[in-house]
């Protein structure tokens, strides 16, 4: 699709993607081995950005127990950023809660404008439910809660195709 967009619109950079774990790549390991599946993602992609869906069973457990405890040193030592993908939950609440849980485990600093910023090794990717309205709503909620926009990457979930 990117090749087609590049050729059709004569664009050098029509879009990009990163290695990403989807629900099927996590759930095939089973609930009891979810952390092992996430560890595998980090091992398979030791550098560069990588996205991992984290709500296959319980996104808050994934943030606190897996990413923030069991796999924390791997996340912090990677040569790249881990994009934690909540992929479900009520917007913007799920984004704010995931940010808070990750900050509780990884800490945060403040930007020059006084907004909270997670360490460079970890960010949040929200793709589910994203459209022009929800994007603005999420960014406003983050600003109101004191979070820097730099903490979040937006994707376009499959539902967006239904709105074209």
Image (tube, grey):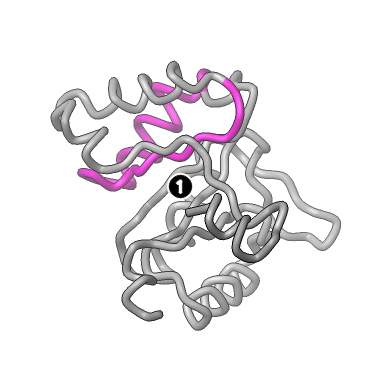
Quarter holding the C terminus?
Answer: bottom left
Q: Which residue is mark 1?
A: 101
The residues colored magenta run 47-74
Helix, strand or loop for disc 1: helix
Nearer-the-camera pick, 43 or 34: 43
Q: Residue at x 46, y 40 (%)?
A: 51
Q: Is residue 26 shown left or right of residue 131?
A: left
**Quadrant position of residue 48:** top right
Q: Seen from this angle, which residue lies furthest right?
A: 112
Whether residue 127 appears in magenta in the rendering, the answer is: no
Q: Residue at x 31, y 63 (%)?
A: 89
**Residue 160, percent across and down?**
38, 71
Whether residue 68 appears in magenta in the rendering, the answer is: yes
**Quadrant position of residue 161:** bottom left
**Residue 54, percent across and down?**
34, 43
Nearer-the-camera pick, 79 or 113: 79
Q: Is residue 139 shown left or right of residue 126?
A: right
Q: How many marks?
A: 1
Nearer-the-camera pick, 126 or 24: 24
Q: Residue at x 68, y 50 (%)?
A: 117
129 up-or-down from 50: above or below: below
Q: Residue at x 78, y 60 (%)?
A: 114
Give neighbour class at mark 1: few <14, some 14-19, many 20+ (Cα, 10 Å).
Answer: some
47 up-or-down from 99: above or below: above
139 up-or-down from 35: above or below: below
**Residue 135, percent across and down?**
53, 73
């Amino acid at each position: 699709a990117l090749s087609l967009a590049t050729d059709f619109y004569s664009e050098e950079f029509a879009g990009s993607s990163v290695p990403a774990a989807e629900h099927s790549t996590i759930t095939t390991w089973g609930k009891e081995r979810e952390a092992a599946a996430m560890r595998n993602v980090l091992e398979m992609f030791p550098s560069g950005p990588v996205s991992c869906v984290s709500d296959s069973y319980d996104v808050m457990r994934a943030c606190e127990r897996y990413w923030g405890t069991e796999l924390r040193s791997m996340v912090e030592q990677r040569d790249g950023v881990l994009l934690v993908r909540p992929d479900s939950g009520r917007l913007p609440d799920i984004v704010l809660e995931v940010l808070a849980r990750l900050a509780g485990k990884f800490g945060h600093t403040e930007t020059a404008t006084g907004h909270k910023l997670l360490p460079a090794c970890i960010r949040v990717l929200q793709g589910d439910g994203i459209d022009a309205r929800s994007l603005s709503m999420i960014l406003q909620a983050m600003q109101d809660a004191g979070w820097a926009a730099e903490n979040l990457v937006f994707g376009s979930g499959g539902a967006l195709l239904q709105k074209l």
